[in-house]
Image (cartoon, rainbow, N blue to C red):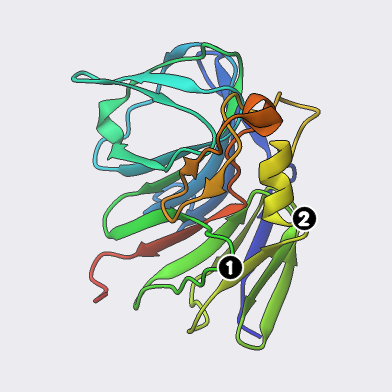
Amino acid sequence: MTTARSITVDSAPATPWRNGGGVTRELLTWPDATDWRLRISVADIAADGPFSAFPGVRRWFVLLSGEGVVLDFADRSLTLRPGDAPLAFDGAAAPGCQLPGGPVRDLNLMLRGGTGGMAAVSPGAAWSAPAGAQAGLFARVAGNWRSGDEQRTLPALSLLWFDAPPPGDWHFEPDVPVSVLHSTGATPEPHETPPPRGTAGLALPDGQCRPPEGGAAKRRGGCFTSGWWLHHIPEGETP
């Protein structure tokens, strides 16, 4: 079986922010914590305030739970909610962050050099790691990752990571069918945050939703993404 690393959000130490506005849980740094080129983390944002600046870093940001954030960049203002596609931006931009609906939790991918990306898991669709990449899966809900004859069971809110990914198609099957999650608007941590405001719908390839017309599901649901594929091609590697 291919060597992999696995960590849950709850098992990662929480580091308070200096401004008191939240905490970060570092899930993975590569090659090390002091001089990283790759960093994957989950943050709990509890108060309005600016993001930290990361010059020379390409950053991906996606909401896991909560009602949404408003990010104020120098040239634009964006409203993001759970179910929206990951936002990629220059880490030096350090937008201001407002929480119109209260605290949120988010997933971050940061790259210093090289290339990479974050993509929502599409129900039933395969994904494969690009050539020369490190890669993994962040599971928002419990389920099973598989590739060929390999299979791993993942708890909710956990990261599975391969420095040398197994080739071929990857799949992630949630323990609870995605259709049920869509219809209920469920979240993996209902005891911590309310379900996101919005409409129930069908997952699209980019992680966004197509809401149904009216009905109870529209009133109570939220777009649901079961996880995200992550990858990093280190500088100097040929994709």
x and y, in percent, of residue 5 in the image: 63, 66
Residue 105 sits in quarter: top right
Residue at 48 percent of width and 84 percent of height? 167
Q: Report the residue that reaches farthest toward the bottom.
A: 149
Q: Earlier in the sequence, mark 2 or mark 1?
A: 1
Residue 220 sits in quarter: top right
- Per the image, the residue denoted by label 1 is 124
x and y, in percent, of residue 36 in the image: 40, 51
- Give amino acid for label 2: Val
- Give amino acid for label 1: Gly
| Quadrant where the image shows the N terminus | bottom right
- Per the image, the residue denoted by label 2 is 176
Residue at 45 percent of width and 58 percent of height? 30
- Camera-side residue: 172 or 94? 172
- Camera-side residue: 126 or 149? 126
Crowd around label 2: few <14 · some 14–19 · many ≥20 (10 Å): few
x and y, in percent, of residue 61 in the image: 43, 38
Q: CA distance from mark 2 to mark 1?
A: 13 Å
x and y, in percent, of residue 70 in the image: 41, 18
Count of numbered tags: 2
Q: Is residue 25 left or right of residue 80?
A: right
- Camera-side residue: 82 or 27? 82
Q: Is residue 224 left or right of residue 127?
A: right
Q: Is residue 197 left or right of residue 78?
A: right
